[in-house]
Amino acid sequence: MHSRKETTVFRKSRPIATLTTVILLCLLAASAQELPDRLEPMDVFRVQVASDPQISPDGKRIVYSRQSADVSSDRRVSNLWIVNFDGSEHRPLATGTYGDSSPRWSPDGTRLAFISDRDGKSQLYVRWMDSGQTAKLTDLENPPAGISWSPDGKQIVFTSLVPAAPPKIATLPAAPEGAKWADAPKVYEDLIYRFNGPGYLKPGYSQIFVVSSDGGAPRQLTTGKFPHGPGVGDFGGSYAVWAPDGKSLIVAMNGSANYEYEPLHTELYELKVADGSLKQLTHRNGPNQSPDISPDGKLIAYIGFDDRYQGHQTTYLYVANRDGGNPHVVTPKLDRDAATPHWAADGKGIFFTYTDQGDTKLAYLPLDGSPEVLADHLNLACNFSVGQNGAFAIQYDTPSDPGDVAVASLAEPKLNVLTSLNRELFTARKLGAVEELWYESSLDKRKIQGWIIKPPDFDSSKKYPLILQIHGGPFSNFGDRFDLQAQIWAAKGYVILYTNPRGSTSYGEEFANLIHHAYPGDDFHDLNSGVDAILAKGYIDQDNLFVTGGSGGGVLTCWMIDRTDRFRAAASLYPVINWYSWVLTSDLPSFGTQYWFGSNPWEDTDNYMKRSVISLVKNVKTPTLLMTGEEDFRTPISEAEQYYAALKLLKVESALVRFPGEPHGLSRRPSHQVAKAVYTLNWFDAHRKKP
């Protein structure tokens, strides 16, 4: 992307696979001929991220997953690297075009368990740290997840899908000898029969296993007809953790036959390793998640809330007795969502994370005190680990850093960033400067937080086109984190504005629930006021305003152009257009009806349609680009297709882009992540008002 010659790429429809190939070849050729000083779309293949840092029990070493994208195979790659706590001896444990993930130290620090697909299928491996020898421990039909060492280091627990017999309606006649018949039809009887990411689901249930850390056949501990731990797509529930005595495990799950209809209802269970017997420890309507047992085995820390069926509900940190008795909130005054609790080695306090005003923090709660912030700028996934000596490692994420390993300790919480995976790239490429913006909503004068990315070499005396980028969720947030796509757009001369309108998390439950049963709605005013606020700064070209967003951001993109024609063009990515059709075709039907509407669509059709952007499509005059993955089951492509057909009937300029093989997010394949950024950029370029 070094010229404007591609600005007419959407004027005619062409095969998407061919278009993507041509764009990538052109970008590669251009990259070979020039040394750009700004980010470009092909940097998707160059940016690396340090993820899931795991500190050794003695606090002296950190192993992390180094994530990148391979341009030849067009796949995500992750390899394990190790670095000392002082930043020395930074080196790989293994390299290759495969995926190593979930590194977990043995209790004595001599071995490392991890999951890898280096032999073609994801399996459990163990590496001896002194010799570097590695052994594959499993040969499973379905991949393992949630690995954890027993306290004595002799066993490893994991979860894996155990197949079940598929539903059967009839016995079909056999094909004649030598005949080649089509594949047999597939029968489904579950409410959740497909899910974003995994796709159409295999019959079966996730079960808990233990395997000897020296190898051998795994032993299955559970057999119930429900997910043991997280459900499909890691939705609801938590993986098993060991009790200090090694005789039992604690797991969060919905252990009822009604689990598909209660998407947030999970309880803590004790699972005996000797015989697989289960005992329910908690009893309430709502989630009980992420358990961690105190070092003396007497208490359990976990997170949850009493379910009121609201769009957003503050998640609190709880502590209960080992048997589930005396459950009580230990963060009653923290109106933010607590996550990932972890006991300190001395049992005197709990490490946990929460996000405040778009910044994710690591905190420590003494059992006899109030939470203390230890570190800012964790990644949104809250990746951290703690050693026995109170040293900790986090995944560090700022507007200029996509993800590095940083360390500190409870005694000395000043962060030291150990890695700099993108230093050379960002030395050669200028990033856009990011600044915070607070402004008032025109609706009710509420304070709204946002951020601005300015193009490299920004000159305040010039006028720049603006892209308003809207986050999804909708109960989520933007923050002072790195955004590669927005930086690529800024490198092409756009100012990017991204804000947290009402409904965003990290500002308290009241602010988030301003859109409870009212989404989309008044968030329009918050977003529109953000555009007004940045226009007032004097460096935005008011004739070149653009809007985009994905998922919930795609919904609000359409909501904006339904209600105003101030934008020159819009790009709505994997949106929901019609709530009635969405709850009946997405992978979250019971969640949508219970939490976002409170009724089934045939019981409250007017409300469903009133909140559907398709109901106002007749107002749209803005040229609109729609993009969705063909394997997106969170916001199925039929949603974008409805809006596209409506715009075509109205003779509004529009284009539909279908991404083959892509689920929600359009980033399974790195080349599709490139295409998503390029298509949006070219659509806006093509509709810019020229001087």
Image: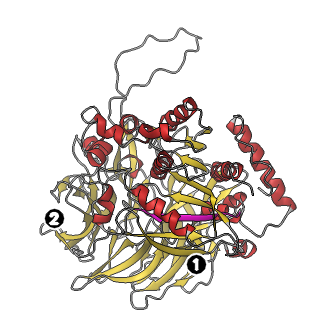
The residue shown at (71%, 48%) is: 686
> Which residue is nearer to you in this view: 492 or 671?
492
Examine the structure image and report whether residue 642 is included in the region drawn in magenta.
no
- Give the numbered dot on residue 83: 1
Q: Which amino acid does label 1 sit on?
A: Val
- The picture places residue 98, in percent across and down from the top left corner, at 62, 55
**Disc 2, SS:** loop
Earlier sequence position, callout 1 versus callout 2: 1
> Which residue is nearer to you in this view: 445 or 277?
445
| Quadrant assignment for the C terminus | bottom right
Disc 1/disc 2 C-alpha distance (Å):
39 Å
Within 10 Å of disc 2 (Cα), the crowding (few <14, some 14-19, many 20+) is some
Q: Can residue 67 be seen in this view?
A: no
Name the residue furthest top. 176
Name the residue furthest bottom. 412
Stretch in magenta: 493-501
Q: How many marks?
A: 2
- The picture places residue 602, in percent across and down from the top left corner, at 27, 31
Q: What residue type is labelled 2?
A: Gly
Q: Is residue 511 visible?
A: yes
Q: Name the chief secondary structure element in magenta.
A: strand
Within 10 Å of disc 1 (Cα), the crowding (few <14, some 14-19, many 20+) is many
**Looking at the image, is 139 positioned above or below residue 510?**
above
**Looking at the image, is 667 positioned above or below residue 656?**
below
- The picture places residue 326, in percent across and down from the top left corner, at 12, 69
**Disc 1, SS:** strand
The residue shown at (62%, 51%) is: 568
- Give the numbered dot on residue 238: none
- Per the image, the residue denoted by label 2 is 324
The residue shown at (48%, 45%) is: 562
> Which residue is nearer to you in this view: 169 or 288?
288
Place residue 629 in its image quadrant. top right
